[in-house]
Amino acid sequence: MVIFVFTFIPLILAEVARKSALPTVEDFFLQSREMSLLLSFFTIYATWVSSFAFLGATSSFYSTGPVYLTCFAWNALFGLLFMVMGRRLWRYGKRRGYVTPTDFFNDIYRYRPLNLIVTAVMLLFTIPYLMIQLSGGAYLIETVTEGLIPWRAAGLVFYLVIIIYLWAGGLRAVAMADVFYGSLVFLSMLVTGFFLIRKAGGVETAFHFIMETEAEAVVLGGGLEADGPAMWLAMFVMVPVGALMGPQMWIRSFAVKRGNTFRLMPFLITFATIMYLGPILSGAAGRVLLPGFSQTDGLIPQMLMKTAPQLLCAVLLCGIAAAALSTANSQIHALAAIYTIDIHRRYLNPAAPDNKLVSVGKWAVLGASAVAYLLLLQSPTLILETGTMGMAGTAQIFVPTVGALFWKRSNARAALAGLLTGVGSLVGLAALMEMGGTYAGCLALAANAAVFILLSLGLPTDMQTRERILTYKATC
């Protein structure tokens, strides 16, 4: 019954959203650029907090110690970046009619090869991250029902629910569902942590036990180790930059109604960081309750199944699943927008009317969900590793974006060369050198920026791009 209620509430909200929906591209993908502060915060927060932040965080605190404490810092950085860059993107988008990131690049640089690469990067690095959201949520449902609902069936149900409310109300339905999901995630993270640490004997008892048995689990490591300060700094940069450059965050920037929303976002996102007390305490409790546990992504479900009453366990695990669904719905919506605007309208049918494009967008929601579900049926990798790799890929978009917003010497060909260098370096370092996505992403981002800056300075000045950057900056 708990799972049924959890699944059904977004469908009720979808019906409410459907009554306000308009058959236009701007309404389906951007809520007619009229998103309020309340909806903006909840949909940004719920999209930002994923399986990566809940299951991945607890797994990291359990296996590598306090290095994940960088999450308190990266939440503040994400909020600041969203305020500074998001507000400019919002102003540009409102005046120039942007719907997707490629609209922005096409308007500033006007270079088709760059448009194609940006679209490809957005697609290729968002889909794997989408896959791990639903795999995490589906696994939780299988756990809480003790196998009565297999994870493949749970994943299919989640996709169907997302398709239904996206089809009904577009971004408006997503944002309304995210108010429910976001509230549930915040409370579940904290309640789970405090409940489990109590079962482990309390904060003082649990950490005293860890200090006596595995003191390294509460001490930051050294050098380039997975639990050292270099990893702390790399994650501090890579996670907020990668999340900010995800297509779902661009769309939220374009959808905001008033500019004051961006000024409040750093405070709101940073305040919400209190949620990470939950994973910290859950990870410490795991050292006491399940020492030597190897499948760390499943740490919280296993502990709750062993210690919590059935009803509480179901509610809390649905809260964890909400973290996955609230990110997955935004990513599916963003992928549908990319196909509809950047591929269908730009190349296949430029003359398509608005109502036709809305129909294309709805079918694109179904197509993106089907692709992600087929990938889900394959063996999913660890949430933390896949999440950092996905963010490292989208983070490469950061360099040409900053250039287009702030630097008058930015050059379209330099942007393309830098982006290709960054993505190529990321894939090469991660595959050939077996380097994790976080370190590989930082090195790739540095190479991307170096190529972009050097070529922008070395190539003849692109006067048209320069004039557009100066003109747009003057309006902010």
Image: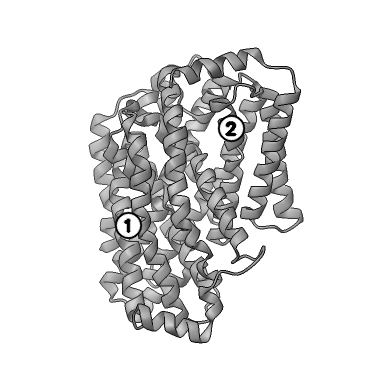
Q: Which mark is residue 186?
A: 1
Q: Determine whether, in the image, residue 342 is placed left or right of residue 197.
A: right
Is label 2 or label 1 in front?
A: 1
- Mark 2 residue crowding within 10 angstroms, few (<14) / some (14–19) / many (20+): some
- In this rendered view, identify the residue nearer to me: 219 or 187: 219
Question: Which kind of residue does numbered mark 2 sit on?
Answer: Thr
In the rendered image, is residue 297 in sight? no
Q: Nearer the viewer, residue 398 or 423?
A: 398
Tell me the quarter of the picture where residue 371 sits: top right
Q: Residues within 10 Å of mark 1 (few under 14, many from 20)?
A: many
Element type at mark 2: helix
The residue type indicated by label 1 comes to Phe
Image location of residue 76, percent across then percent down: 43, 48
Distance Cα–Cα, label 2 vs label 1: 33 Å
Res 43 quadrant in image: top left
Q: Position of residue 72 (x, y in %)?
A: 44, 56
Residue depicted at 56% across the width and 32% down the height: 402
Considering the image in quadrants, where does the N terminus appear? bottom left
Residue nearest the observer in this picture, 78 or 314? 78
Quick check: 216 above or below 342?
A: below
Does residue 241 appear in this view?
A: yes
Instruction: Tell me what residue is drawn at x 59 percent, y 29 percent.
Output: 403
Q: Is residue 45 above or below residue 350?
A: below
Query: Is 130 placed left or right of 454 in the picture?
Result: left
| Label 2 sits on residue | 119
Residue drawn at the location 29% of the way across and 39% of the way down: 39
